[in-house]
Image (tube, coloured by chain):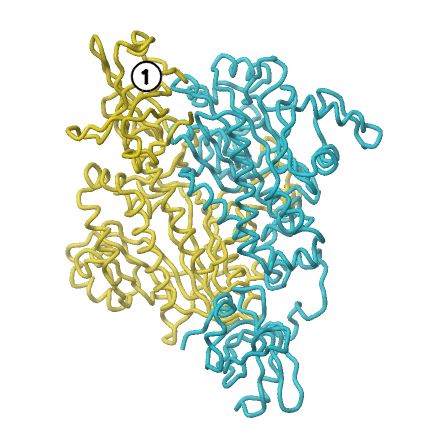
Chain colours: A cyan, B yellow
Amino acid sequence: MKAIDFRDLFKSYENYNEKEIEIEGWIRTIRDSKNFGFIELNDGTYMKNVQVVFESHLENFEEVKKYSTGSAISVKGILVMTPEAKQPFEIKATEITMEGESDPSYPLQKKRHSLEYLRTIAHLRPRTNTFSAVFRVRSLAAFAIHKFFNERGFVYAHPPIITASDAEGAGEMFRVTALDLDNVEKVDGKTDYTKDFFGKSANLTVSGQLEAEIFALAFKNVYTFGPTFRAENSNTTRHAAEFWMIEPEIAFADLSDNMQLAEDMVKYVVNYVLENAKEEMEFFNSFVEKGLLDKLDNVVSSEFGRIDYTDAIEILMKNNDNFDYSVQWGTDIQTEHERYLSEVIFKKPVFVINYPKEIKAFYMRMNEDDKTVAAMDLLVPGIGELIGGSQREERLDMLEKRMEEMGVPKEDMWWYLELRKYGGVKHAGYGLGFERLIMYLTGMGNIRDVIPFPRTPKNAEF
Amino acid sequence: MKAIDFRDLFKSYENYNEKEIEIEGWIRTIRDSKNFGFIELNDGTYMKNVQVVFESHLENFEEVKKYSTGSAISVKGILVMTPEAKQPFEIKATEITMEGESDPSYPLQKKRHSLEYLRTIAHLRPRTNTFSAVFRVRSLAAFAIHKFFNERGFVYAHPPIITASDAEGAGEMFRVTALDLDNVEKVDGKTDYTKDFFGKSANLTVSGQLEAEIFALAFKNVYTFGPTFRAENSNTTRHAAEFWMIEPEIAFADLSDNMQLAEDMVKYVVNYVLENAKEEMEFFNSFVEKGLLDKLDNVVSSEFGRIDYTDAIEILMKNNDNFDYSVQWGTDIQTEHERYLSEVIFKKPVFVINYPKEIKAFYMRMNEDDKTVAAMDLLVPGIGELIGGSQREERLDMLEKRMEEMGVPKEDMWWYLELRKYGGVKHAGYGLGFERLIMYLTGMGNIRDVIPFPRTPKNAEF
C-alpha cells in the first residue's frame, strides 16, 4: 500500500469511506486518555491536518501514547466520515509505525511563537501553519507567473547573476571574488583584479533588465525570474540583500502595452492564488490581515487607474499638510503618497506615469516635453509601489546623451548601445519584486517572513 | 490593427486567406529586382520566417529596397496561400514601415558564423537560427520542469544564493563581500569578516540541497530551480562558473522512489520539448546532432536500467584495456566509463547505485554493508552523467560519524543535524544540471552555447 498525500485525500476522501488507507506525516499534536487517543497529523502537502484515532487494541498502544510532537509516523487505518465534527473524516488506526522520532525538546509545541523567534529556527518554521501557508503561496505564485508568460508565448531568459556591468548605478553591489582576501595583490595601491577569476572586478546583479532587452530584441516577448542583490545596509521590514525579481521585456511595444501587461499579470497571479490556495488565503484573511480577501477581490475586478505624475503631484500638494514629507513637482513620491493615491484617491491599483527625468534611470525613454520620461509605477492599496517600469530609450543619440549627463560609462555598455544600432525597435518592460508580491498576497508585514532564508545585514544563517 | 505573432500565425494562417493582416519583426534577408522584392521576416516568437513580397506600387518602394538586414519593420499586407512553394503562405505588402533601422555594419549577414565568433556577440546571437532554437528550448524545458513538479504538488523552494555554509566541501566557492578590497581590515593578519556585510565570511551557493532538505521535512515533496556557482578554474566544454540546477527532495522516500522520480521527470521534459518545439528539434536533428530525435525517442520509450556500482565495475574491468583510465572497485567512474555503460552495455539511460562511501558526499545514507552509500547517478547515452543523487543519512549518530570522518564542521551545520533530531524521516533527492540537460536536448556541444551569457575563467562579458 502506498500512502495518500493529504492534498489528494481531501479532494477524494468520499471514495475511501469505510476503506483502509495508508497515510504518513508529522505529528502536530497528540493527546490520549486511558483507552484511546487522538493524533493531529500533517504531511506537508496540504494546509489541513488529518485526525487519527488510536485505541487500546493497537499492539503498540502504550508506545504510541508516548510519541512526541514533531515525530514522523505512518498510519494504516479505516477512513470514517464524521459529519458531526469540524473535520469531514477521521482515520481509525489499525497500525501505527514510527518513521522518525522527535526529541521532546522540539521547539514547536502547541503554544504560539513570535515571528521574531521563528526566524531563529528557519529550519523548522516551515512546519508551522503560518509558514507552511506562506511558502505554499510563494510556490503557487511563482508557478502562476511562469504559466502566465508561457501561455502568452514569452521566452523565459536567464540573465547572468555575476556581472561586470551595473544597471542602476554602482555603490550598492556585492563584490564576487576568488581572490585571497588575506593577501590581496595590488598595483599602485589598488587591488589587481586582473588576477581575479574573471580577470576584472565582478559583482552580483541588481537587475537582469539590460540583458532582458537583448532577448526582447530577438524574441519579442521575454521575461526573467531570478535572484537579485543589494548590499544596502538598511534594516527595514521591506529590504533584503537577496530577493527574487520578475522582469518582463517586450519589443514593438510602448508604455501603454507595458501597463496592460502588468495589469493582466497581477490579476492573473492573484486569481491563480485565490483559486489554488483557498485554505491558505482564508487563514491569512482570518489571522494575518483582516479584509485581505476583499482587498484582492478588488484588485481582480477593478480596472487599474492611470494618472500622469504631474497630475498626481497636483492632487498630492493639496494634502501636503498631512504628509510627513511634502511634495512638489520634481520630488520623488514616497510610500505615504503612493498609499494616499491608491487608497484614498483611486481606491484601487493605479499607474503613475511620466516622471521627471531627474528622478529616474538613464535608460528610460525621453518624452516630447524633454522634461519627463516614459516611466510607470504601479501603486497598490496597502503597500504602495508594487511594480516599476518604463519604455526604454531606443534612440541611440538620446541614450548616449542621457548616459553622459548621468555619468554612466559608455565603454562597458558597448553592447547595450549596439542594440540601438541594429534594429532597436521601441520596447518596454518592468520589474516586480517577488517578495513584495508575496507580502501583498499574504498580508505578511516583514520581508524576512516571506523568503525562506532571508539575507540581511549581519545575517546569513542557514 | 494589432500585429499577429508568428507562432499564432503559423497555427491559424488558413483563417487569414486573402485577408489583410499586420505583422512585425526583424529582416533576416532582403533581395530585390527592378519591380519587386522579397523580405524574410522573423518576429522572434517562432522558428520560421514569413516571406513578404513587396512591389513597385508601394509608395516607399525605392526606400524599402534599401532596408538592411537586422532592421525592425512592420508590414500590412494580404496573406496568400503558396501551395507550390516551400512556405505555406506569403504576405503581399500593402504598407511597410521602418520601426528600427539597422546599420549596414550588422554582423549577422547571410554567411555562416562560427560558434566561437558568435560568443563574442552574445547580445546578437539570439537572433540566429541556432541560438533562437537553443534559448527557446531552454525556456520550454524550464517550464516543463515547473509544470511536472506542480502537477505532482511539489512545493517550489528558493534556497539562499548567498550562504555561510558549504554543502560539498569548500575551496571552489566564490566569496561575496561588501568590504573595500583596497583596504581590507585585518586582525592578526587575517581578514576581519566581522566588519563585512553579513558579519562573517559568505559565499555563493554550490547547491541548495541542504536547505531543500529543510523544506522536504516540512512539505514532503519539494524542488529548487536556481543558479549555483563554482569557482573552478577549468576551461572545458562542460564547466561554467555559473549554472542553473534543479534539486528535488522527497520525504518518506528512499533511493528507489528517487530513481522513479528522476526517470519520470526526464521523460516528461523530453516529451514536452519534443511536442512543443517541433521545428527547433528538427533543426537540431538536421544541423547539430544527426540522430538526436532517435536518441530522445529511445529515452522516452525505454525503461531506464539499474545496476549496482559493484556490478558495473565488474563489467567495466573486462574492458579496462580500451579505457584511458582503468577502473577497479573504489575508483570513481569517468565519462568514458559512463558512456560505455549507457551506450554499449545498456543502450539506454541507466542508474548506477550504491557507490563506495569514500568517493561520495558525507550526507549520503550508509548501506548495511558499511562500505557503500545509497547514491545514484543517472548515465545517459551521448553525455554520461546527467543526474546525481542519493538517499540522505537521516540517522543522527551515523551522520555525525561521517561528518567527523570527512572533516565537515558540525558547529556550522547545527540546523542540518537538528533536522535528524526532530522527525527526521527517511528522505532522498537529486540534482540535475540544467545546462547539461539543454546540451542533451539540443545536441549542442559546449556549455557556453546553451546559457545566454556564460561565466567562465577570465570572462564575465555582457
Mark 1: which amino acid?
Answer: Thr
Displayed quadrant of residue B59: top left
Which residue is farthest right? Answer: A321
Relative image position of residue B311 (x, y in whole percent): 24, 68
Q: Is residue B433 above or below residue B370?
A: above
Q: Chain of mark 1?
A: B
Answer with left or right where residue B461 lies relative to residue A98.
left
Q: Is any part of residue B400 visible from this angle? A: no
Q: Is residue A51 above or below residue B168?
A: below
Displayed quadrant of residue B135: top left
Going 73% across and 33% down the picture, which residue do you hit? A345
Q: Is any part of residue A142 visible from this angle? A: yes
Q: Is residue B245 above or below residue A262?
A: below
Going 53% across and 28% down the picture, which residue do you hit? A166
Which of these two is toward me, A157 or A249?
Answer: A249
Which of these two is toward me, A308 or B307?
Answer: A308
